[in-house]
Every structure is written in C-alpha cells, then in structure tokens.
Amino acid sequence: MLLFAAALAWRIYQLVRAPSVANWAVTAAIAGFAAAFLLLLPAISVPLDEVFGRGAARVANNVLLAGGLCSLVIFFLGSAIGPRRRYGRVAAELIPLAAAITLMVVAMGLTPEPLRGMDTTASTVHVSGIATFYLGAGLYLIYGLLACIWWIGRYFRVADRNLRIGLRIGAAGLASMAAGSVLRALYIVIAWVFGPAVRVLLLIAAPLVILGIVAFLCGVTYPGVRARFAALRRRRQHRRQHERLAPLWTVLVEAFPSIELRSAPRRRWERVSSRGIHRAYYRRVIEIRDGLVQLSPYLAADFAELAEADPDAAASALRSALTRHAGGEASDGRAKQVLPAGADDLESDVRPLLALAAAVSGKAA
C-alpha cells in the first residue's frame, strides 16, 4: 500500500503539472489498482457487503482492477500509435472491458448467496458461479497485461534512454503478473473441468503477482524519480555556482551598479525554492556578462581567450581595467568579446566565469 500511495501521489503531482490524456490514464490506472487493493481489507470489504449485498466488495475489487488495467492499455497504445488513431482504439478497448464486467456481475448473481465473495479454494472452485467469476476476471487480466506488454514493445522504439529503463522494469512486472494470472486460470480450469485442485499453481502464482506489482510500480515511477534527482542535483549545482560567482559579481556591481537587475521583493520560501535558486543563478550570470561588456573597452582584445587559458592573468587584467575605469581614464570606446566564442548555451559561458571568479577571489578554481 505504501508503494501504491507513493506512486499515486507522484502521478497526481505530474497530473496537476501537466493534465494530459496520458497522465490522466496512468493516474486512473494506479488509482484503480490502489482502490482494488484497499477493497481486499476486511475493514472496507465487510461494510461494503453489508450495504450492497454479499459479494459486492469482490465484484468492485475486480472491476477496479479491470478498469485500471484498461486505462493502462489505453495509455500505452496511445503513446505507441499517436493521438490521431487513438480514439477508435480506445472505443475498441472498452468492448472486452464491458464484456468482462458483465460476465463478473452475472456470475456473481448466479452464485448461491452464502458462497458469494468467497475465494477459489479447493472446496469452492467447483462451484460454477465462482469458477466463472474468477475465470472471466482472470482472462481479462491476462488479455490486458499482454496488451500492455505488446504496446510497450511498440513504444519502446521511440522512448528516450531513461524512459526505456522504466519501461523494461514495468514490462517485466506486467509479464510476472501475466504469468501469475495464467497459472491461476489454469488452476480454475483444471479443478472445474477435471476435478483435482492443483494448489501448487496458486502457490506459484501469488508471489509472481506480488513481485510483478512491485516491479510495475517501480517502473512507472522510475523516470519521474530519476528526473527529480537530476533536478535536485541541478539545483545544488546552481546554488553552489551562484555562491562561487559572488566575488566576480561583487566587483562588477560596484563598478557598474546599473547592471543589477531589479525585481519585486520575494518571500523567503520563494528565495529557497528551486525556481528561486535557478532565477538567482541566471540573473547573476547575466549581470556578470553585462558588467564585463561595459568594462570591455578597458580590456584587451584577447581577454576572452585569456579568461579561458589563464584565469589568473585574466583576473589581473580585470583588476587593472576596473582601476582605470574608476580613475576616469579614457578607453578606446569599443566593446570587445568577453567570453570565448562558440558557446552554444549559458552553461558553456559559466565555466570560464567560474574560473575567473575563483582567480579574482584568490581561490583555486
């Protein structure tokens, strides 16, 4: 239940951030599985049977499992075939779901009332209503699990590396659950048709299903958890780099106060949030670049190369330029390249700035 709760909380968080059809489908699937699991608890199933009649909790449990699995099939087939062909396939997937639910409801209604809701034990598996109920539910589970594995295989071709790892884990979990469901169906068929109840099939099926559920939940949450850890690492990196750039930023702001960007006051939690840390980091980098551009008429033409090749020499040239600027010395008036050319993103600009900031502060980069 802890795994279900963690996975559901994560998917709801993703759904709030991006309420797409795919996120709705996955969230509905996990919610259905979690609710079905809760209905196995006597504290919930017994009152439900008292209100709606004996066997109601068992029907609801299997309907939620089937509905959650159908949502999962819809998610994977939608991811594999794209939105244009999705809606016709979604309608087609509702047909076996409706047939399975109808069969379960009818079978439960035909089961003698004292036996409704009972599990498939050696003494009950020969009852036609019970055998039909669990066989119908099991066959749909087998179909849905195999369909998910099939669509995962199709989607695997276009998924990125991190998502592929999660898909492998999830597919392994679904395969384990499918194997357990097949063994359970064999147990029912053999006992119902031929007589003997081969209990070892259930003893093997149960751990396969449990391990499959755990693996599936791990696979579903793996990409998001990995992305979250990557975001936390990036947040720590930006916070450290923001602090390391402080010496260079300070000397430039003292020389050119106008480079400091103005913004509305922020609450404390906004300053320590991920968004606030990233904003402060990017602002500092931009302000440093603006300051270097304003100081560039006092710098030599090769300052950009010097900052990358010899940060200590670049720091000395920077101090000399700041002194001449503060003394009012005339410059050539031409802005110069202050960072190495060829950088294709902001992070590439930061590396020489960090080295320059360390040299300005007298610390090793």
Image (cartoon, grey):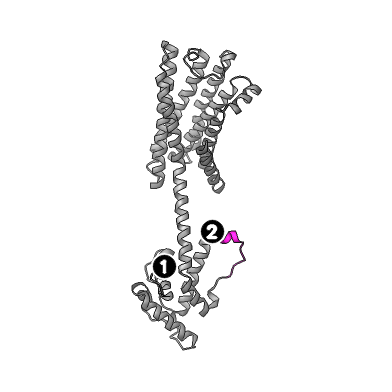
Residue situated in front as seen by the camera: 302 or 158: 302
The three-letter code of the residue at mark 2 reads Arg
Seen in the image, is 192 located left or right of residue 306? right
Q: Residue at x 44, y 17 (%)?
A: 188
Q: Residue at x 35, y 76 (%)?
A: 306
Query: Residue at label 1?
Result: 349
**Looking at the image, residue 153 lies above or below residue 332:** above
Q: Is residue 19 visible?
A: no
The three-letter code of the residue at mark 1 reads Asp
Query: Residue at label 2?
Result: 275
**Looking at the image, residue 115 lies above or below residue 20:** above
Q: Position of residue 143 (x, y in %)?
A: 44, 27
Q: Residue at x 48, y 67 (%)?
A: 243
Q: Position of residue 71 (x, y in %)?
A: 51, 34
Q: Position of residue 12 (x, y in %)?
A: 55, 43
Magenta highlight range:
262-272
Q: Determine crowd level at label 1: few under 14, some 14-19, many 20+ residues with C-alpha closer than 10 A.
A: some
Numbered mark located on residue 244 in the image = none
Question: Which callout, 2 or 1, points at the residue further toward the start of the chain?
Answer: 2
**Residue 311, quarter of picture:** bottom left
How far apart are labels 2 and 1 at the CA level? 21 Å
The secondary element bearing badge 2 is classed as helix
Q: Residue at x 63, y 20 (%)?
A: 53
Q: Determine crowd level at label 2: few under 14, some 14-19, many 20+ residues with C-alpha closer than 10 A.
A: few
